[in-house]
Amino acid sequence: MTSAADLDEPFTTRDRIVEAAANLTTQHGWAWVTMSKLADEVGVSRQTVYNEIGTKPALAEAMILHELSRFLELVTTAFDEVPDDLVEAIRRASCSVLEFAQDNKLLHAVVSATHGADTELLPLLTTHSQSLLGVAKMVVGERVQSYDVPLDSSRLDAAIDMVVRVVLSHVMQPSATPDETSRDIAWIAERVLRS
């Protein structure tokens, strides 16, 4: 018989390194993180860290994408909860993501880093966020396919891009509560999707 533990993916050395990098970043800042410190933290050689991750910029991207996967799990759950109402799924997904972002220590460490080498993480969430946006749009796009949306594919892609970018901007710089913001995002999405 298969247990829940058997269904979980194994926690690889790479996963342990990325998790340790996130923990060290939240505790000390990104500038403090080195491959040697990571090796010590994980209990592997520095060469193993390089073999698993590569360069420090590659580590930063892996760390951000790992964190993104946690956000996207919330999106998937929200869409699963309301398979017959796309606008409500968008509202719930937006609200869950924004609530999670409020308490996310790594996100706060990245956004609040304003000096020295710490600023090299911020572009991964803003100006150089193609990987992050691409993955998020792909996941949302796959989920939206199961809904009856009266838009052609190019217009639907534009709508998904708009929703993902608006949510990301509010993750980075909230202007209201998650509930208020998610209701506004759903209102906009409804007008675009049902036009």
Image: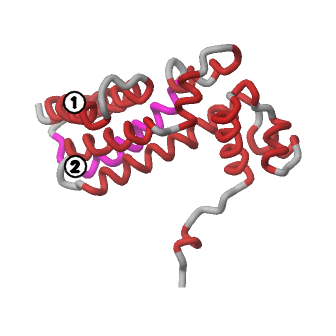
Q: In the image, is 184 to the left or to the right of 161? A: left
Q: Residue at x 81, y 35 (%)?
A: 35
The quarter of the image holding the C terminus is top left
- The colour style of the image is secondary structure
Label 2 CA crowd tier, 10 Å (few <14, some 14–19, many 20+): few
The quarter of the image holding the N terminus is bottom right
Residue 82 location, x and y as percent? 23, 54
The residue labelled by disc 2 is 147
| Camera sees residue 152 | no
Q: Residue at x 36, y 46 (%)?
A: 142
Tell me the tag on residue 124. Answer: none
Q: Secondary structure at mark 1?
A: helix
Comparing marks 1 and 2, which lies closer to the viewer?
A: 1
Magenta residues span 129-149
Q: In the image, is 190 to the left or to the right of 141? A: left
Q: Is residue 140 magenta?
A: yes
Q: Nearer the viewer, residue 105 or 163?
A: 105
Q: Amino acid at mark 1?
A: Asp
The residue labelled by disc 1 is 184
Q: Nearer the viewer, residue 149 or 40?
A: 40
Residue 29 location, x and y as percent? 68, 28
Q: Secondary structure at mark 2?
A: loop
Q: Residue at x 21, y 45 (%)?
A: 88
Report, in whole angstroms, how far the alpha carbon at label 1 lies from the one at label 2.
21 Å
Q: Earlier in the sequence, mark 1 or mark 2?
A: 2
Residue sitting at the far left: 195
Q: Residue at x 76, y 45 (%)?
A: 52
Residue 147 location, x and y as percent? 22, 49
Q: Is residue 117 magenta?
A: no
